[in-house]
Image: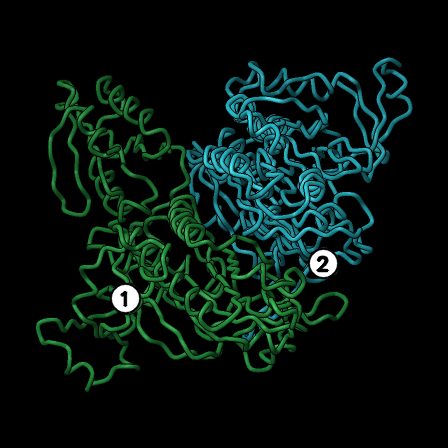
Chain colours: A green, B cyan
Amino acid sequence: MRLSRGFIPTIKETPSEAQIASHRLMLRAGLVRQTSAGIYAWLPLGLRVLRNIERIVREEQNAAGAHEVLMPTIQPAELWKESGRYDDYGKEMLRITDRHEREMLYGPTNEEMITDLFRQCVKSYRDLPLNLYHIQWKFRDEVRPRFGVMRGREFLMKDAYSFDVDHAGAVRSYRTMMLAYMRTFQRMGLKAIPMVADTGPIGGDLSHEFIILAPTGESQVYYDAAFESVDYLAGGFRHESDEDLERFFTDITSRYAATEEMHSAEKWAAVPATSQREGRGIEVGHIFYFGTKYTKAMNAAVAGADGKMFHPEMGSYGIGVSRLVGAVIEASHDDAGIVWPDAIAPFKAAILNLKNGDAACDAICEDLYARFGGEALYDDRSDRAGVKFNDADLMGHPWQIVVGPRGAATGKVELKRRATGERVELSVDEAFAKVAG
Amino acid sequence: MRLSRGFIPTIKETPSEAQIASHRLMLRAGLVRQTSAGIYAWLPLGLRVLRNIERIVREEQNAAGAHEVLMPTIQPAELWKESGRYDDYGKEMLRITDRHEREMLYGPTNEEMITDLFRQCVKSYRDLPLNLYHIQWKFRDEVRPRFGVMRGREFLMKDAYSFDVDHAGAVRSYRTMMLAYMRTFQRMGLKAIPMVADTGPIGGDLSHEFIILAPTGESQVYYDAAFESVDYLAGGFRHESDEDLERFFTDITSRYAATEEMHSAEKWAAVPATSQREGRGIEVGHIFYFGTKYTKAMNAAVAGADGKMFHPEMGSYGIGVSRLVGAVIEASHDDAGIVWPDAIAPFKAAILNLKNGDAACDAICEDLYARFGGEALYDDRSDRAGVKFNDADLMGHPWQIVVGPRGAATGKVELKRRATGERVELSVDEAFAKVAG
């Protein structure tokens, strides 16, 4: 994208309504604009990040054997009356009456709808295990929306739902998703830690939340340092064998990790002092096993091998896709702006032309811009160098390729790594290879 | 996808609620399921088609210089009170009251919201022309939703909005979008014809709707045969020069084309009899020029070159993305099922294993399946050959690769083209090359 023709409205002043870094930076860098309390429009830069996160989530869900569907945002109230949650859910549920006076609602989650879809479509144990997910906008009418997209009202969530013939199958599905989550967050450049969680209004008796570490996080967390060194993308963390999965799950759950609410002083004392870590964290995912809660309440039954009907065991698995954009920024920013992890950055690199109109500068910039084929943001504006440096730092591209007249005359550019501030003078080819590689 | 492990619930019986072919076939082939009147869940096969259509729309919008954003589904009523449309819109607008008694609505279109976003972000004529689009779910509370996704209540639309400094600029934006639309529909394998339209509740004084020809279409249409032979993907139909655009627009608008409501017997008589074509059509896109209607009503003004504030000229440009799935099927099906155009088919090919467990059949199928890398649907079920043939025809994959024990023994497969029914015996390599090429 050429910045001169793009739509990236940056803001110099610190927006007064933003209380936390991610909210401030998302407004300032032109990622989003608020349209109502807790509701945001995504501008091109923010949308690119959102799509990158979505893509990684999707790839890992597919790799774990889940099937993508897309359920609508508007649901009929009857389904929630069947499950018994219609009255329980309270004012967070956005209730709607249509022109024919039918009670509808904007889905805050989809256990009821997926169970209904399942009972319409699946008739036999032979179709199990089955895991269906979608990435769709949800609405929760928070009484006091705040922190930008971190606690918005309309938000994008990936939610998956597993159906299994028995408890053992459901536990396997649960573990498969847990591993997929660890891989997902690691691919985004995040350090995520699963912590035993209360099951809350969704119900059930096995549940973990995934907390990423960020100094400005909402919760105090306690964890074993062993979590910091595991590489879930390495061999041995495939979804293939039950043994792999068993070992993974045992490792994960045998290490101490807890939010303040679930913290046990006694268990904490058993962690060697050199391994004790405390910090702040942000919840970005949550998984639940809840057995036959919904399949029984909504009578979703399939025929077993013996011909008898039975209610499959379910679990649900959520990732806050839009929330992650804010959470990543909380985990990775500095005073100058955002510091995007490579995998989800809106652009790999910014090309800063320090002297528009200088033939050598223009030629090098155009050449680089063409080579990146859409993966670079070309700052071709006629602004001063200082403005370009500041905006590039603010927007947080992992690399900046600075093209000035002195270097350009001899075919040199300066390559800056945003995360470290390290700068090095390189030939155009070397700079391109370094960023593209 | 392996059909045995996939989630493609086909239906043998003709669903009684479906009155038209596309609705019937989308239910039978397992593309969608209804969740409430006029509201659908997209199953994996349908979602793949929806995403293919979305991708083509997006590529052509980007190529035309539009910028992708993503506005939320829920809008504040105040914006619509500013424009004056809140009371006009009637019962089709899904009105919502949130927990704080604020009036909200589920967006049926986004002129107000984009104008609000524009006035928040754009301050100078230097940022024009600007064209912003998004692909987002909309809701129109149709009194009698019917015809499946063709007239649903929750539907996916691409809507773009252009902002220009003056009338000439706005006309150029209008023509650019018109050309992008012709290219978009052609890439999907559709014959689309732009027809002068009433401007309706959106207002304005220049408008075309895009009608695709389908024998079961909702409207009677009259058009010049010249429309059938133009190739908008060929050279000469770029967005680059004003002259190209002028010539394109003059050509398009000088040919006769009208829906029944706008049909003129007098003008029709002037079309040579050999060029007169009549048929049925389905509206899949609509473009409008409406000048300063919204920028004035909502006071979205920017500074001109002379320093004076002015109200930019706007247009809006819609494509019914989810509707297109149904429209394509109306335009392309037969008694046996769907006949997908190659560009939007959920899978390029189905691989039919006629004898699961036969070593040669299994080996060829697995080899082909691996080579297609996700672009083929492998029917590895233990069903009879007849079931597999019927389902492949029903689902409408452009190619079927039939692997039976007799051919497999000598490394041969049968390749069937869905659209023509043509069958030919080929080696595995030849069949793969033919489909992949």
Left or right position of A35 against A307: left
Toward the viewer: A123 or B49? A123
- Residue A319 is situated, as x and y percent measured from the top left of the image, at 41, 61
Which residue occupies 28% across, 69% down?
A250
- What residue type is disc 2 on? Asp
Toward the viewer: B26 or A218? B26
- Residue A421 is situated, as x and y percent measured from the top left of the image, at 14, 44
Q: Secondary structure at mark 1?
A: strand
Toward the viewer: A351 or B358? B358
Q: Is residue B190 above or below residue A234?
A: above
Residue identifier under label 1? A193
The chain containing the residue under callout 2 comes to: B
Q: Secondary structure at mark 2?
A: loop
Query: Image quadrant of residue B427?
Result: top right
- What residue type is disc 1 on? Ile
Label 1 neighbour load within 10 Å: few <14, some 14-19, many 20+: many
Q: Tell me the mark number nearer the camera, choosing from 2 and 1.
A: 1
- Residue A382 is situated, as x and y percent measured from the top left of the image, at 29, 30
Which residue occupies 63% across, 68% down?
A302
Query: Image quadrant of residue A119?
Result: bottom right
Task: Count every numbered label the image shows and give the total.
Answer: 2
Label 2 neighbour load within 10 Å: few <14, some 14-19, many 20+: many
Q: Is residue A403 above or below residue B35?
A: above
State whether residue B41 appears in this view.
yes
**Quadrant of the snapshot with the N terminus of chain A:** top left
**Quadrant of the snapshot with the C terminus of chain A:** top left
Residue under disc 2 on the same chain as residue under disc 1: no
The alpha-carbon separation of the residues under discs 2 and 1 comes to 44 Å
Residue identifier under label 2? B141
**Furthest residue in direction left, as rendered:** A274
